[in-house]
Image: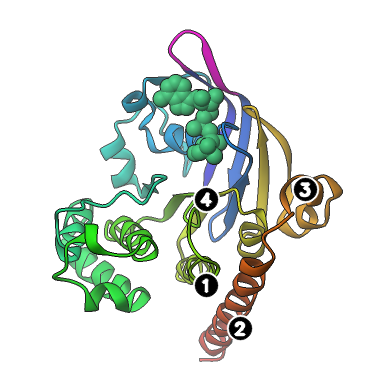
Amino acid sequence: MLSVRGLGVRYGRSVSALEGVDLEVATDSVVAVLGGNGAGKSTLLRAVSGTLGLHGGAITSGEIRFRDERIDRLDPAVVVRRGVVAVPEGRQVFARMTVEENLRAGGLGARSAADRTAARARVSELFPVLAERSGQRAGLLSGGEQQMLAIGRALMSGPSLLLLDEPSLGLAPQMIGRIARIVTEIHSQGTAVVLVEQNATMALQVADHAAVLEVGRIALAGPAEELAASNDVQRLYLGGHAESDEQAAAEVAQARSHRSARRLARWAG
Ligand SMILES: Nc1ncnc2c1ncn2[C@@H]1O[C@H](COP(=O)(O)OP(=O)(O)OP(=O)(O)O)[C@@H](O)[C@H]1O
Ligand SMILES: [Mg+2]
C-alpha cells in the first residue's frame, strides 16, 4: 500500500534528517516505527503526509508511493484526499473550538457526505467519550481525551492509511492501554496504521511489522514478534515501561479476541 524507497530528507542546508530510508506498509497492517529522540520518526511521517515544506524540510532523494502512485510531490491536502492522514505529535486539537467543531473540521477532508456520515458514526463508536463531550471546548479535555479527539478528527476524512506520531507520549499507563486498544480496533476496521512510538513495548504488541530508526537510518526491521525478541531491541527500547505494558497487553489481547470473534462470524455468515 505504502512504499518508501531510499528516502533522504534535509532541513535547510545543513541538517540531514533521513538517509536511504525504506519502509513498506501492506494493506491491512500496522507498522511500528521506533527510535529515540531525533531519530527522524516525525520527519518520516511528514515526508509521507507531504508536510515537510511546512517545517522547512525537503526530500533530497528517493520516492514515496501510495497504491503505486508517487505521492512525494503532492500537496498535503491532495495526499489526504488520496486516503493518507496524519495525526502529528503533541495532541494537536483546536483548543478554542468544541469537540464537535474539531470533528467537523476533520470531516472537510471526506470524499462525500455519505462518507462523512459513516466516519462520524465510526468515531462515535470508537470514542463514546467524545460524543458525551461534544459541546465542550477541546482545550478543556484531558490529555488522553485530546489524543482521542486528534485521532477521531483524522478518521473523519475516512483514511485508508493513518499515520500516528507518538500517540502514547505523556499519557498514564491506563490511557496508553486504551490508545493501544483503539489502534487495534481501527486496524481491524480496515485502516492500515503507521505507529510512531518511543514506547516500543506498546507499539510491538499492536504492530505486525516494525522498523527501528537510528539517526536517520533504518537500523532494524522485521516482524514485530522478531523485533520484540531481538536482544538489541530489548536492550535499547524495552526497559522500564512495565506497568503500562501490562495494561497495553491486556487491552490488546481483549481487542484481538473480539476481532477474531468478529472475523469468524463474518467468515461463517
Ligand atoms: N523543523 C526542523 N528544522 C530543522 N531541523 C529539524 C526540524 N525538525 C526536525 N529536525 C531535525 O531532524 C532530525 C530528526 O528529527 P525528528 O523530529 O524527525 O525526530 P523524532 O524521531 O521525531 O524525535 P522525537 O522522538 O524527539 O519526536 C533531528 O536532528 C532534528 O533536530
Ligand atoms: Mg517526533
Q: Residue 257, which numbered label?
A: 2
Q: Is residue 83 visible?
A: yes
Label 2: few (<14), some or many (≥20) within 10 Å? Answer: few
Instruction: State which mark lies toward you, 4 or 1.
Output: 1
- The front one of 145 and 266 is 145
Looking at the image, which residue is at 23% across and 55% down? Answer: 106
Label 3: few (<14), some or many (≥20) within 10 Å? Answer: some
- Residue labelled with disc 1: 174
- Residue labelled with disc 3: 233
Mark 3: secondary structure = helix
- The front one of 212 and 160 is 212
Distance from disc 4 to disc 3, alpha carbons, whole Å, reads 19 Å
Indicate whether 49 appears above or below 262.
above
**12 in the magenta segment:** yes
**Earlier along the polypeptide chain: callout 4 or callout 3?**
4
Distance from disc 2 to disc 4, alpha carbons, whole Å, reads 22 Å
Label 1: few (<14), some or many (≥20) within 10 Å? Answer: some
